[in-house]
Image (cartoon, helix red, strand yellow):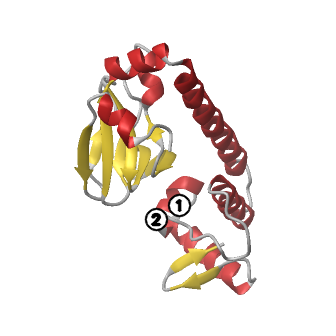
Amino acid sequence: MIFSEEILSSLGADVLYYKINETIFSEGQLPNYYYQIFKGAVKLTKDRENGTESIFGVFFKGQCFGETFLFADKTYPFNAVAMEDGVILRVPGEKFIDFVTKKPEFLLRLYRFNAERMYFRYAMLNCLSINDSMLRIKELFTILKELHSVKGAFSYQIPFTRQQLSSLAALRLETVIRTVKKMEKDNLVEIRNGKIFY
């Protein structure tokens, strides 16, 4: 959890409820709020001309998203979309910036989160440079498992559909489906009720 519910409430946070696939903010909008997930998951996406989407980041309970744009005079270069029904705390941007600039320990907490996010982003770029689809998906699963600090074989449930995995891994849906089946056959993953465990 980046900031507690109590801290965000003291800054006048709104509690917003989102349904799966509902847009939280859109590409081209000015950033006016700090967003932190209280429940659910959010993806940062860009729709492509061919009807596909690229996923630039995925965020889970306790994490914030899009906050770095509060510190720049730029519009959002992507959309934020709910990946499942969820609850988000939203604080006016000016109040949030005033708060973190007056409380260096909280600004440091935000820097640490951003450093971890940058590590994940560069690990993902490295993952996308792998040509072999099985190695690429295996590396993606390893990154996700490490991100959530889960250890042990088949102990981490991949929180994405095959379609979302295809967007994350920049592979065709058919390739992801075929590769995951082969990974199951090779005992690299387990499939339980349609869910992937790594």
Q: Is residue 186 above or below residue 19?
A: below
Q: Dot 1: within a 10 Å radius of its alpha carbon, few (fewer than 14), some, or many (20 or more) residues?
A: many
| Residue 107 appears in the picture as rendered | yes
- Pick the front one: 190 or 11: 11
Q: Quadrant of residue 90?
A: top left
Please provide percent x and percent y for residue 148: 62, 57
Q: Which residue is mark 1?
A: 166
* Of the pair 113 and 58, the residue shown nearer to us: 113
The residue at 35%/34% (across/down) is 8
| 44 sits to left or right of 145 | left
Indicate whether 55 appears above or below 79: below
Q: Position of residue 91 (x, y in %)?
A: 31, 30
Q: CA distance from mark 2 to mark 1?
A: 5 Å
> Amino acid under label 1?
Ser
Image quadrant in which the C terminus is located: bottom right
**Nearer to us in this view, 12 or 195:** 12
Q: Is residue 166 left or right of residue 112?
A: left
Residue kind at label 2, given as amino acid type: Gln
Residue tagged by mark 2?
163
Q: Which numbered marker is on residue 186? A: none
Q: Position of residue 47 (x, y in %)?
A: 38, 44
Asked if the residue under mark 1 is in contact with the one under mark 2, i.e. CB atoms within 8 Å, the reply is yes
What is the x, y in percent for residue 36?
A: 40, 40
Number of marks? 2
Find residue 69 and report its image quarter: top left
Q: As drawn, is 84 to the left or to the right of 69?
A: left
Q: Secondary structure at mark 2?
A: helix
Disc 1 on helix, strand or loop? helix
